[in-house]
Amino acid sequence: MERWASLEEVDFSFNELKNIDESIRLLGDVKKVNLSHNNVTDIGPHLQHLTCLTELDLSSNGISSVQHWNELLGNLKKLILANNAIKDVSGLSRLYSLEYLDLKNNAIDTVAAVYPLGGLPCLEVLHLRGNPVRKVVEYRTRVLEAFGERSWEVKLDGKAPDDRERDTIRYISGDVCAFSDEVESS
């Protein structure tokens, strides 16, 4: 048991796991857990006991809901949820330590669905490639707008906002005075 307690990184990928049972509690000091490429549809209550957990990979599972995850995964800095069936990300809106979020190839289809992520103060990287929302006109600008003044700090799909996107965000967000002052001083 002591050996389990000292593990900092575990890889349970490609094991056809359907759920995360209470045995995960034995990993008291684990920081990184890879549960990718399994059959997990719900994370259940046991991950909340992993208080040192900072990185979690649940890509390529069958997850469609992330409701209440903020209550279970409060210390996460990196969360990989690519290749699932997630449509609503509001359950991630209070993961305030989150710096990196990969939601590639899910079912997110509206910009409004992404807006709850705009309140994450530490988020620096957001991946949304392969989601229907990418078909929305001015997709990047509209998603980055959710981050308000922090929109310059967020890399969306691996790319920081360019000058045109920054200007558009400033204009849309009503900071027209700052925008026109900047143009005049150029």
Image: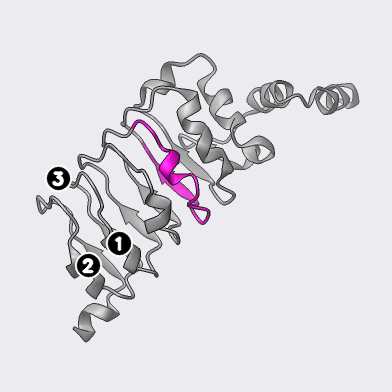
Q: Quadrant of residue 177?
A: top right
Q: Quadrant of residue 92?
A: top left
Looking at the image, tell me whether mark 3 or mark 1 is earlier in sequence order: 3
Q: Which residues are magenta?
A: 87-103
Q: Residue at x 50, y 49 (%)?
A: 94
Q: Residue at x 44, y 22 (%)?
A: 110
Looking at the image, tell me whether mark 2 or mark 3 is earlier in sequence order: 2
* Quarter containing the C terminus: top right
Q: Which element type, helix, strand or loop, lies under badge 1?
A: helix
* Quarter containing the N terminus: bottom left
Question: What is the basis of the colouring in this image?
Answer: one colour
Q: Residue furthest left?
A: 16
Instruction: Decide: is 174 above or below 151.
Output: above
Q: Amino acid at mark 3?
A: Asn
Q: Which element type, helix, strand or loop, lies under badge 3?
A: loop
Q: Residues within 10 Å of mark 2 (few under 14, many from 20)?
A: some
Q: Which mark is residue 39?
A: 3
Q: Residues within 10 Å of mark 1 (few under 14, many from 20)?
A: many
Mark 1 touches mark 2? (CB < 8 Å) = yes
Quickly name the residue at label 2: 24
- Give the Cα separation between the discs numbered 3 and 1: 17 Å
Q: Amino acid at mark 1?
A: Leu
Q: Amino acid at mark 2?
A: Ile
Instruction: Decide: is 47 above or below 62.
Output: below
Left or right of residue 50: residue 125:
right
- Relative to the observer, which residue lies in front, 156 or 175? 175
Quickly name the residue at label 1: 47
Q: Which mark is residue 71?
A: none
Left or right of residue 168: residue 30:
left
Q: Which element type, helix, strand or loop, lies under badge 2?
A: helix
